[in-house]
Image (tube, rainbow, N blue to C red):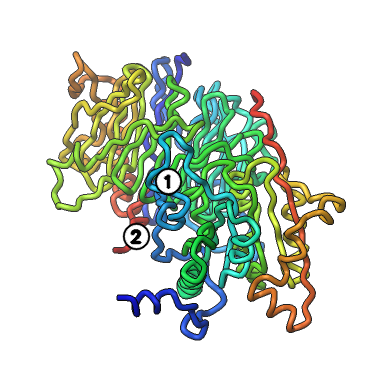
Amino acid sequence: MAAEEEEAAAPPQKRFYRQRAHSNPLADHTLSYPSRPQDMDWAALFPSFFPPDAAPGTAPARVEFVDVGCGYGGLLVALAERFPQTLAVGLELRGKVAAFTRARIRALRAARPGAYGNVACVRANAMKHLPHFFRRAQLSKLFLLFPDPHFKRTKHKWRIVSPAMLAEYGYVLRPGGLVYTVTDVPELHQWMLRHFGEHPLFEALPPAQLAAEPLLPLLPSVTEEGQRARRAGRAPNSAVFRRRPDPPAAAP
Amino acid sequence: ENPTKQLLFSIVKAPGCSSAVILGLFFPCSDESLFVYDCSSAEKQPLGEKGQDGKGTDKGSDDILAFAFSPSGDYFALTDDNKRLILFRTKPSWECVSVRFVNRRCTSLVITAAEDKIFVADKSGDVYSYSITEPQADGKLELGHVSLLLDVALSADDRYILTADRDEKIRVSLTKAPYSIVSYCMGHREFVSKILVIPNCPDLLLSASGDSTLRLWEYKSGEEVHCCQLSTICGPQATKPDQKFTVSRITYCCQGGYVAILCDSIPTVYIFQLDATARQLVYKEQISLKHKGWDIAFEEMGDLWILQEDKEAPLLLYRACDGQWKAVTDDKGLQKMSKYIQDNWTVFEGIFMQRMPGSVEHLHEAM
């Protein structure tokens, strides 16, 4: 029993979790997801934040940070260390990659009891399932780090930034919440700037606030993709957008 | 209420001869004429125009995919497999106002209460608006889902636009700011095939899904207030143990709060009544059909029309007497309409071989 536990808690090795980089988000993968946010068992993912002896009437902990396309978990690990009291979830569509990240977090938790209890990875399709997992205005930060550029024009609708997705990001993010984007593909960076810039619910963070953003310097290098880009000499392009207040539901 | 409210059953098309016949029952005014419009006579998009990805425009048929009256009945719009959007005025008499072209084939459309716009939902998940006040104006992209849209509806005051998709979601957005999502009505476990805002309970939304449920929602908050398992209620009549009850038609009558539904492949009309105070749907009774039910429609005053696959009696009329629904046979309108269908039977025979607008059977995920 002890040997099994040890094995389960050992850091995972990437070579056992290789998977093709591109995934079709419009396909019907057999994924499990809750019917509604209130049906999601977050306690199973963050046991240390859902103690059984919690005083009745205490509001349950809620996820606030989401890494869309979390890959091998580089950002999640960094968020765990910098925001230990905030729940962060990484969504990853590729099965083996999600399995790797779950194993990685499990190993980190075993190696340092009391730490990394606030981050978790869920295999999910962010393009289809955001409203299944998250309530309106629940999140304060959303990360889109090195999203798949899906270069071909016919594949543009697979891109994680589109007018349809921006409405969904606007729904799950609270007013004042932030979206962070990083990419080493200049055309994709321009695409994201344009889409967020044109969307009435978002505004680019002004330069002064951008300079003061503590997370920003970290983002280009904290993930696998970012490190790969750096090794290849491709410069990262970052941006931060803020969710503006809701439009008034005025009478027509 | 508008005294000349018309009823529409369905659009039918005969294979080989591309004509579409609209059945309209003008009621109760004395004019009992029938309006016939041949969609194949409407202009087609010029050939040779390339689509967005450089391919030529594909040839469609004249099948009508979606249609709707405006709430007052003054306007009628339809969209077909040739990507046409045709707008009609119905007063003082029916006339075609404009023929426009949509980008992609549509699945549903709705006209605003203000009668200034048509909202059209298409197969790629987008909703476009088309002006009525400027009937030749191009469409404008309003909002988009990631997956195929199956139905679109508006709140009675036009303030909210509701869209239902293949991925179980019902989204509620502000009509004036459609990029702003007010709520999601989450809970269905399969595609959402039909949504209907209850006209005299304007905070309530009725939805039907491939998961064999009818659900009532307080749509502004997204809260589900009632879930009706059709397999439990209608179950005893099931022919197979895993019979699905996929609602293909819903019709509602403010008078009495009656809801009638037709399910794919089941020759029965199920009648419910909405208890607005308790916010529940109460099952009342069923009308068994000897033939496949094709469409159902309530009249304002509460009579229920049923269109069925039977040359002898293609139209049935039912009326509630002391809470029981009974067939009516001596109605002049019924007799006149039935005769028209019988006289033009070859046109209608085509129905039985093609897929009706709104059929969603193919959307059940392969097990």
* Residue at x-position 19% and y-position 24%: B327
Please tell me which residue lies in front, B279 or A132: A132
Relative placement, left or right, of B90 versus A249 is: left
Up-down: is A123 above or below A1? above
| Residue B2 position in % (x across, y down) | 48, 16
Q: Circle 1 is placed at which residue position?
A: A36
Please tell me which residue lies in front, A90 or A86: A86
> How many residues crowd around disc 1 within 10 Å: few (fewer than 14), some, or many (20 or more)?
some
* Residue at x-position 33% and y-position 76%: A2
Q: Quadrant of residue A6?
A: bottom left
Up-down: is B11 above or below A169? above
Please tell me which residue lies in front, A215 or A49: A49
Q: Nearer the viewer, mark 1 or mark 2?
A: 1
| Residue A78 position in % (x across, y down) | 64, 65
* Residue at x-position 45% and y-position 39%: B185
Tally of marks: 2
Q: Chain of mark 1?
A: A
* Residue at x-position 74% and y-position 61%: A191
Residue B55 visible from this viewpoint: no
Relative placement, left or right, of B171 versus A206 is: left
Residue, far bottom? A15
| Residue B61 position in % (x across, y down) | 47, 56
Please tell me which residue lies in front, A66 or B342: A66
Q: Amino acid at mark 2?
A: Glu
Residue A69 visible from this viewpoint: yes
Q: Quadrant of residue B29?
A: top left
Residue at mark 1 to residue at mark 2: CA–CA distance:
20 Å
Q: Amino acid at mark 1?
A: Arg
Residue, far right? A208
Q: Circle 2 is placed at which residue position?
A: B365
Query: What secondary structure is marked by label 1?
Result: loop
